[in-house]
Amino acid sequence: MKDFQLPAYFLSYLEHGSVKVTCNGDPSIDFIVKDDLRIIDVIDIPIEITKRPGLIKQLSEAKDLARNLDDQNITLEIRLKGELVLKLGQRANPKLAKIITLSNHIEITDIKKLKKLSDVF
């Protein structure tokens, strides 16, 4: 199978709307755009992803995206079943997460749920 990567910077160009991804009729991911806010709500991931980096590596790779979103005055919220887990970009307030991410643009709001997401992706 060939590797496929969707550039995350496409988030900067969307202005409004929503996309709902389903698998076998069951909701999997909701993507919502409201002005300068982008929300990715992971409801269920019915597939197994075998090649994935660890949580720290994933967060370090998110730094460029978070900085780009902040430069564009955009905030991306990652949610798990409706509950906020991670915030990237303009409205991120890193507090103690800055020690882990080394970024002013990544806020971890729920480390346990972030770990769950990390185990999936």
Image (cartoon, rainbow, N blue to C red):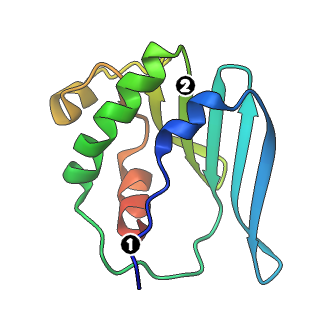
Locate the N terminus by quadrant. Answer: bottom left
Q: Amino acid at mark 2?
A: Thr
- 2 or 1: tag closer to the N-terminus: 1
Locate the C terminus by quadrant. Answer: bottom left
**How far across and how far down the image is residue 26, in percent?**
78, 75
**How far across and how far down the image is residue 11, in percent?**
58, 36
In the image: residue 96, left or right of residue 10: left
**Image vertical order of residue 62 relative to residue 28, above or below:** above
- What residue is rendered at 30% in x and 20% in y? 95
| Residue at mark 1 | 3
- For residue 102, what is the image quadrant? top left
Mark carried by residue 75: 2
Q: Secondary structure at mark 1?
A: loop
- What residue is rendered at 44% in x and 14% in y? 71
**How far across and how far down the image is residue 116, in percent?**
41, 62
**Toward the viewer: 27 or 85?**
27
**Image vertical order of residue 18 relative to residue 107, above or below:** below
**Viewer-side label of 2, 1:** 1
**How far across and how far down the image is residue 68, in percent?**
41, 24
- For residue 47, what is the image quadrant? bottom right
**Toward the viewer: 9 or 17?**
9
Seen from this angle, which residue lies furthest front? 2
- Mark 1 Cα shell of 10 Å, populated few (<14), some (14-19), many (≥20): few
- What residue is rendered at 64% in x and 39% in y? 39
- What residue is rendered at 62% in x and 69% in y? 44
Q: Amino acid at mark 1?
A: Asp
In the image: residue 7, left or right of residue 77: left
